[in-house]
Image: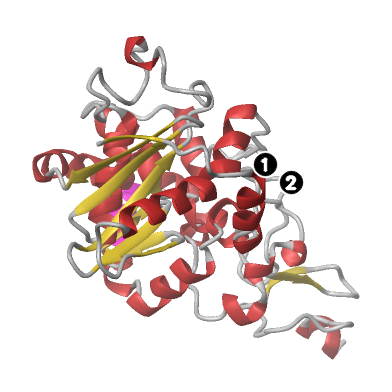
């Protein structure tokens, strides 16, 4: 479907929309130091009940295993993940990460997972490169302060509201809500963060993916001649495009049967309802699982490619790198996870057990 954007949307309207949902930050990097300065969604009350991130699987002793022994360990770990990940914890994770890139926990729990944005590459590549595995692990992640990212982040809420207003005219009881990181207990290696969850009495539940292309921010004029653009000459999403694979994984992980794919510019507004492509998922999901078990999981367990591992502060209790909330002993400066020392709130003064007894 193709629609022309009404000029009635004013700057005041946009400001009002931003007041309802604050402007998202741009892919902020994860700090390896004390995470007590993390964003508000990592307050202890909300962190309680979250699953451990996949990066918590790291065990320095596994670096000594032979390749064959490590493969066996990976298979055992994968099966354990599929049976021990709790649905209630994952529901909590989705709830506390609704601000997506502004959420510290969102970044932490995406690390090591094959997310929707990476699904196309993983599904169409025989062997992942070292650099791509490092990208999945989010090593040395930096802030992307580029115009295209900033534009997309800034205009997403405007496009979401426009979508909601338009769809409400023809769909009874329509509701559109933001969504955090979705993970299924049976497929804990996958992660999906759609731009919205939509429900209505006539169509049921679906997901929304919004694109605000910076290159064509004024209008889509000339986009049909661009071989890299996501829409074809009929302004339909190309089934070979990265975005098509992205929304297919959205639908699989979120367990819905449709995705409303939205393209928003200053002059045009396009909504295409895309159904679940069972054939594509049947062909690609086994490959994604194999890539995770044989290529990503070994890195989660050993972190052989991590350039900052030697300089990172490890927890003095469990020996693993930072994730979630951490605290330093005021006497020995030892570094500890809250969960390892059974702390829920940071006290003004804190001593580890060894220092408290000495």
Dot 2: what SS?
Answer: loop
Dot 1: what SS?
Answer: loop
Please name the colour scheme applied to the rendered image. Answer: secondary structure
Image: magenta residue range: 69-77
Please tell me how crowded label 2 is: few (under 14), some (14-19), or many (20+) other residues with Cα within 10 Å. Answer: few
Residue contact between numbered discs 2 and 1, judged by CB atoms under 8 Å: yes
Q: Quadrant of residue 321?
A: bottom right
- Taking the spot 22% from the left edge, 61% from the top edge, the residue there is 255
Instruction: State whether residue 141 is above or below residue 92.
Output: above
Q: Quadrant of residue 285?
A: top left
Q: Nearer the viewer, residue 5 or 145?
A: 5
Query: Disc 2 versus disc 1: distance between alpha carbons?
Result: 5 Å
Instruction: State whether residue 135 is above or below residue 335.
Output: above
- Percent coordinates x, y for residue 332 in the rendering: 87, 71
- Percent coordinates x, y for residue 168 in the rendering: 33, 59
Q: Label the magenta part by its dominant secondary structure.
A: helix
Q: Nearer the viewer, residue 5 or 283?
A: 5
- Taking the spot 79% from the left edge, 68% from the top edge, the residue there is 334
User: Which label belongs to residue 311?
Assistant: 2
Side of 120 relative to 33 (left or right):
left
- Percent coordinates x, y for residue 219 in the rendering: 46, 23
Q: Which residue is mark 1?
A: 308
Q: Residue furthest left?
A: 279
Q: Image quadrant for the C terminus?
A: bottom right
Instruction: State whether residue 298 is above or below residue 333.
Output: above
Please tell me how crowded label 1 is: few (under 14), some (14-19), or many (20+) other residues with Cα within 10 Å. Answer: few
Q: Residue furthest front?
A: 8
């Amino acid at each position: 479907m193709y629609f022309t954007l009404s000029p009635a949307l004013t700057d005041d309207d946009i400001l009002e929309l931003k007041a309802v949902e604050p402007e998202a930050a741009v892919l902020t990097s994860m700090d390896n130091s004390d995470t007590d300065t993390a964003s508000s969604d990592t307050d202890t009350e909300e962190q309680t009940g979250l699953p451990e991130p996949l990066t918590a699987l790291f065990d320095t002793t596994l670096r000594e295993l032979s390749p064959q022994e490590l493969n066996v360990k990976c298979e055992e770990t994968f099966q354990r993940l599929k049976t021990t990940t709790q649905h209630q914890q994952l529901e909590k994770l989705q709830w506390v990460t609704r601000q997506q890139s502004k959420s510290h926990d969102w970044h932490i729990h995406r690390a090591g997972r094959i997310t929707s944005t990476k699904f196309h590459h993983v599904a169409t590549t025989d062997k992942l490169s070292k650099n791509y595995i490092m990208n999945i692990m989010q090593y040395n992640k930096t802030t992307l302060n580029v115009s295209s990212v900033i534009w997309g982040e800034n205009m997403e809420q405007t496009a979401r509201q426009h979508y909601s207003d338009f769809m409400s005219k023809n769909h009874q009881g329509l509701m559109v809500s933001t969504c955090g990181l979705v993970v299924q207990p049976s497929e804990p290696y996958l992660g999906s963060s759609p731009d919205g969850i939509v429900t209505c009495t006539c169509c049921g539940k679906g997901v929304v993916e919004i694109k605000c292309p910076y290159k064509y921010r004024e209008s889509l004029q000339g986009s049909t001649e661009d071989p890299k653009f996501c829409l074809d000459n009929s302004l339909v999403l190309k089934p070979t495009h990265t975005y098509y694979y992205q929304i297919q994984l959205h639908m699989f992980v979120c367990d819905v049967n449709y995705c409303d794919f939205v393209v928003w510019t200053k002059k045009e507004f396009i909504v295409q309802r895309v159904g679940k492509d069972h054939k594509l998922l049947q062909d690609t999901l086994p490959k994604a699982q194999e890539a995770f078990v044989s290529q990503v999981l070994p890195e989660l367990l050993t972190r052989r490619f991590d350039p900052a591992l030697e300089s990172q502060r490890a927890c003095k209790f469990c020996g693993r790198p930072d994730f979630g909330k951490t605290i330093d002993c005021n006497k020995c400066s030892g570094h500890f996870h809250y969960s390892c020392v059974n702390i829920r709130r940071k006290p003004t003064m804190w001593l580890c057990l060894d220092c408290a007894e000495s």
